[in-house]
Amino acid sequence: MKLSVLIGVFVILLACIVALFAPWIAPYTYDQQDMSVILQPPDKDHLLGTDSLGRDLLSRMIYGTRVSLSIGLFTSLVAMAIGTVYGGVAGYKGGWADHLMMRLVDVLFAIPDLLLIILITVVIGREFWGIFLALSLVSWVSVARLVRGEVLRLKEMPYIEAARGIGAGSWRILLRHLLPGLRGLLIVTFTFRIPAAILSESTLSFVGLGLAPPFSSWGVLANDGWTAMRFFPHLMVFPGIAIFVIVLACNLVGDGLRDLWEPKSPV
Amino acid sequence: MIKRHFVLLLLLLPLIWLSSCDLQGNHINDLQTFRMAVSSEPPTLDWNLATDSISIRIIENLMEGLTQFDQDLNPVPAVAKGWKVSEDGKTYIFPLHNSISWSDGKRVTAHDFEYSWKRLLNPATAAEYAYFLYDIENAYEYNSGQIKDPSLIGIKAIDDTTFEVRLRKPVVYFPSITTFTATFPLRRDIVEKYGDHWTDPANIVTNGPFLLKEWRHEYSLTLTANKDYYGGRPKLDAIRFYVIGESTTALTLYETGGLDMVSLPPLAIPHYKKHSEYSHHPFLRGYYYGFNVEKPPFNDKRVRQSFSMAIDRTAFPEILKGGELPATSWIPQGMMGYNPSIGLSFDPAGARALLREAGYPDGSGFPEVTAVFSTNPENLLIAQNLQAQWKKNLGIEVKLDNQEWKVFLKTLQTNTPPIFRLGWGADYPDPDNFMNLFTSTSGNNRTHWKNREYDRLVEAAAMEQDLEKRKRLYDQAQKILTEENVPIMPLFTNAQNLLVKPYVKGFRPNAMDITYLKDVWIER
C-alpha cells in the first residue's frame, strides 16, 4: 500500500473518531454563546478563536464533523444503492426499458443539481434529513449511468453467456455474476462520492441553503466565516482547511482503491 | 479547421464588444454621480403602496409632497407654499406653488393630491399606509368600506392651487404626515394608462429633483438630475443605487472606490471606529419581534410575556457593536414620550413561572414554533442569540427561518408566522408614528392584535395639546403594549454607522435616515 493511501485512511479514521466522540472531545457545546469573548482570535481558552456570538469555533468544527461526515457517508450510500439497482436493471434488461429509464436519467441530468436540491429542501425543510434526502436524490443519477455502462459491457462477456447457456435465471445472473463484476467500480465510485457529497453540503450551506441555525457543519461555518474574512480570517480559514483535508483524504483513498481493483486502468 | 475557428471568432467579436459596452454605463458624467448600495431590490416604486425603507429611500429623491423635513426634522413647505389652520385646528388649507411641473411638463395641481390621497384610501388599492390619513374626516369609513362615496372624505382640491383637508380631530403633527411618501401627488392619467407598469422608467412621471432613468432589476437603479426642478437643478448629475445583498460586499466596493457611502456591517464597526470617514448617528428606528396573537401558543399573553422576559437585551450592543440601545419600551430615545422604565425587564425566573402557569413547565409540551426574519447578517445574529436565550432561560427550542425581503413581506401579509422580526423607522418624528402602528386599524400591524383601550389612548394622545398629559397617555399605552398584552417585544433602538467619502459634500444624515440627495455634490 502506498503511503498516500495510508495517510488518507488515517485522516478519515481520525475524523470518524472526532465525529463519534464529539461531545467528549469538544471543550464547549456547538451553540453555547458567551458575550464576553465575541470574535476572539485563537488563544489558549479558544484554540481556534470564537465567532460573532462568542461560540467556540473548535467546538463548532468538532460537531460540524458529525454533520459533514454523516451527510457524506449516508448520501453516498443511498445514491449508490439507488444508482446500482436502477442502472443495473436498465443495462441488463436493455431494449425499450433501458431506453425509457435512461431518458429519465437524461432529463434529471439536464436539470442543475442546485435547482433540484433547492426545490426538495423547500418541500422537506432545511433540517438534517431534508439536506440528506435532497443530496441523495440528485446524486444517484451519475451512479446509474456508470453502472448501466458497466453492465452493458459485462453482460456480453462469455462467462455470462455461459451462465445463461446452462439455464441460470435473471436474478441469479444479476446477483451472482454481474454484481461481483461490478464490485471494483462500485467501491471506487463510492469513495469518490463521499468527498463530492461533503462538498455539495458545504456549497449548499455556503450559499445559505444548508442546515438551519444553530447547527453547524463545515459548510455552515465557512459561510459564517467568509463575510468576516477581511477582519477575522480565522473564521473562514479553519473550516476551509478542514473541508480541504477531508476531501483530499477521501480522494487519496479512492485513488489507492482504484489502483488496487483496476491495475490496468489507464488513468 | 483554422478558418472555421476564425469565422467563429469573428462572430463572437460583436458580442464581446456589446457586453463590454454594457459595463461602461450609459453616458452619464461619472464625476457628479453619487453611488450607494441598497440591500435589496425595492419592492415597488408606487408611493401609495411602498412601505419599506428601500423603496422610500428612492422615492424621496424622485418626488416631493406638500411639505418636507428640514435638517432638524421640522416640516417645511415644499409643493405647498405654506399652510393655514382654522381656529378649531381641524381644517388645513395648503396653497400650492403654481410653477411646479411634472417631468412631462404638466403642472402639479391640487387635483393630483386629491387623486393620490383618495387612491391611498380606496379599499381596492389595499395600501398598508392608508391608515396614515385616518385623521381625515370619513377617511377610515371610506377605507373600511362603510361608505362608498369618496366625495364625502375631507379631501378637496378647491382649485388648481388650493388643497383643503378637513380633519375629524385636531392633530398636532399633521404637516409632518404630508412629508411622507405615501401622500405624494399622483397623476391619474398616467396610472390609468399604464396600470401596474406606471412605475417603469419609460412611464413614470415625477416632480422631484431627480428622474428615474433606468431600473435594471436586481442590479441597479439610476436617477438623473431634473433640470426643470423648481428648486433649481440639483448639483449631482446622477445617483446610482446598486442592489447589493451582502453588506461586506458593499464595504469592499466602498473601499475600492465603487461606492461613495456605505452603511457598516456589525463585524466591521470596531475596525473603522477611528477612521476619518466613519460617523455614528442616532436613529429613530426600533427593532422588535412580533407575535401572531391569533395562533397558539402565542394567543396566550402569558407565553408572550414569558418570551419577552427571557431575553437579556444587553447582549445586542455586544453582538452588533454599533452603539445600539437595548429597549424594553417602544417609543425610541430622542422622541417625546421615551420612557425606558416601561416594559418587561430580564427576569428568567419570572419568565419560567409564567410559562408554567400557561401549561408548559420548563418548556415541556411546547409546540414547535419557527421564528421568521428577513435575510440579513444582523438579523441572523440576533435571531441566533434569541434562540439560544430562549433555550437557556425557558427550555424552548425555537426554529429559525430566513426569507428574502420581498418574500418575507408577502409571508407577513398572507400567513403571519408565530414569531417574526420587524423594525420600524420613524416616518415623522412624533411618537404617534410609533404608537399608531399597533392600533387595530393600522395596515402595518402584523400581530393581529386589537385592543380598544390601546386604540383609545393613542387617539387621545394624538389630540392632546398639553405635553405632560400627552406623555402620560403614551406611558399608559406603552404599558399595555409592552407589559400587559405584549403583542411585540421591543429589543433595541438601532444606530447608524456610516462611511462617507471625503469628497462627498453636503451630505447630512439625520435620525430618520432620510437622504434627500438634492443638496449633495462631489468635489474631488
Image (cartoon, rainbow, N blue to C red):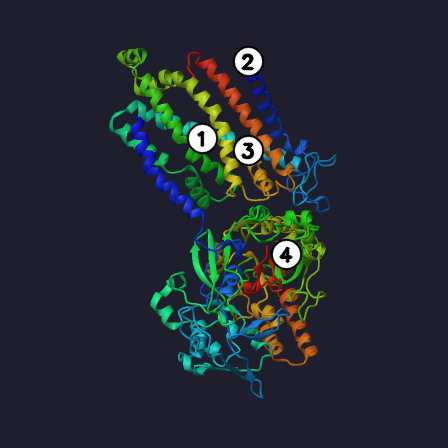
User: Residue B439 at x, y = what percent?
Assistant: 56, 70
Q: Residue at x 49, y 19 (%)?
A: A255
Residue identified by numbered label 2: A2
Whether tag 3 and tag 2 are in contact, CB under 8 A, the answer is no
Label 1, residues with CA under 10 Å away: few <14, some 14-19, many ≥20: some
Amino acid type, label 3: Ser
Callout 3 touching callout 1 (CB < 8 Å): no
| Image quadrant assignment for residue B507 | bottom right
Q: Is residue A195 left or right of residue B274?
A: left
What residue did someone put label 3 on?
A68
Q: Quadrant of the C terminus of chain B?
A: bottom right
Chain to which the residue tagged by mark 2 belongs: A
Rendered view: B29 above or below A234: below
To the question of a shared chain for discs 3 and 1, the answer is yes
Amino acid tagged 1 = Val
Query: Which quadrant of the structure image shows residue B142?
Result: bottom left
Image coordinates for residue A98, horizontal then vertical, percent: 28, 28
How crowded is the residue under tag 4: few (<14 C-alpha within 10 Å), some, or many (20+)?
many
- Label 1 and label 4: CA atoms lie apart by 41 Å
Few, some or many C-alpha atoms within 10 Å of disc 2 (few <14, some 14-19, many ≥20)? Answer: few
From this viewpoint, is residue B476 visible?
A: yes
Q: CA distance from mark 3 to mark 2?
A: 27 Å
For image coordinates 28% across by 32% down, the residue present is A100
How far separated are the C-alphas under marks 3 and 1? 16 Å
* Chain under callout 3: A
Residue A189 or residue A231, whichever sits in front: A231
Residue at 36%, 41% (x, y): give it.
B15
Whichever of labels 3 and 1 marks the residue nearer the N terminus, that label is: 3
Task: Residue under label 4, please give it.
Answer: B307
**Badge 1 and badge 4 both on one subunit:** no
